[in-house]
Amino acid sequence: MRSIIQKDRDRCYLCGRPGTSFEPLDKHHVFFGSNRSLSEKFGLTVYLHHSECHIFGKNAVHSNAEICRKLQREVQAQAMQHYNWTAEDFIRIFGKNYL
Ligand SMILES: [Zn+2]
Ligand SMILES: [Zn+2]
């Protein structure tokens, strides 16, 4: 499913800059691991610069736990609003509360 979080897929969700040939934008599943397919199903995905913002940078979601959790909090709140879920609904689906 298309991202419900990000309409403009030509810019990085974290830094706001466009992708480049050196730093293309990756689709990041905000709730990954065992919840990856649920993130896909509900459109809880964002676009991030492959190296700097997604995987390797010091502020990248997969290397900086604090930034990862901040994004998960934001996206859980947006998902609850979008789908009209309570926190309990979210926990029932994703098995965890990130708020
Ligand atoms: Zn970026
Ligand atoms: Zn990712």
Image: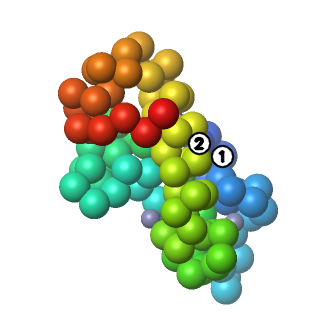
Element carrying mark 1: loop
Q: Are marks 1 and 2 in contact (CB under 8 Å)?
A: yes
84 to 48, vertically: above or below: above
Residue 26 in sight: no
Which of the two residues, 5 or 61, is positioned nearer the viewer here? 61
Q: Where does residue 13 sit, x and y in percent of width and height? A: 65, 53
**Residue position for label 2:** 6
Q: Which mark is residue 8?
A: 1
Q: Where does residue 51 sit, x and y in percent of width and height? A: 59, 80
Question: Where on the picture, by quarter, is residue 43?
Answer: top left
- Please name the residue shown 59% across and 42% down the image: 6
- Please name the residue shown 52% across and 39% down the image: 73
Quarter of the picture holding the N terminus: top left
Which amino acid is tagged 2? Answer: Gln
Q: Where does residue 79 sit, x and y in percent of width and height? A: 45, 29
Q: Where does residue 99 sit, x and y in percent of width and height? A: 48, 33
Which amino acid is tagged 1? Answer: Asp
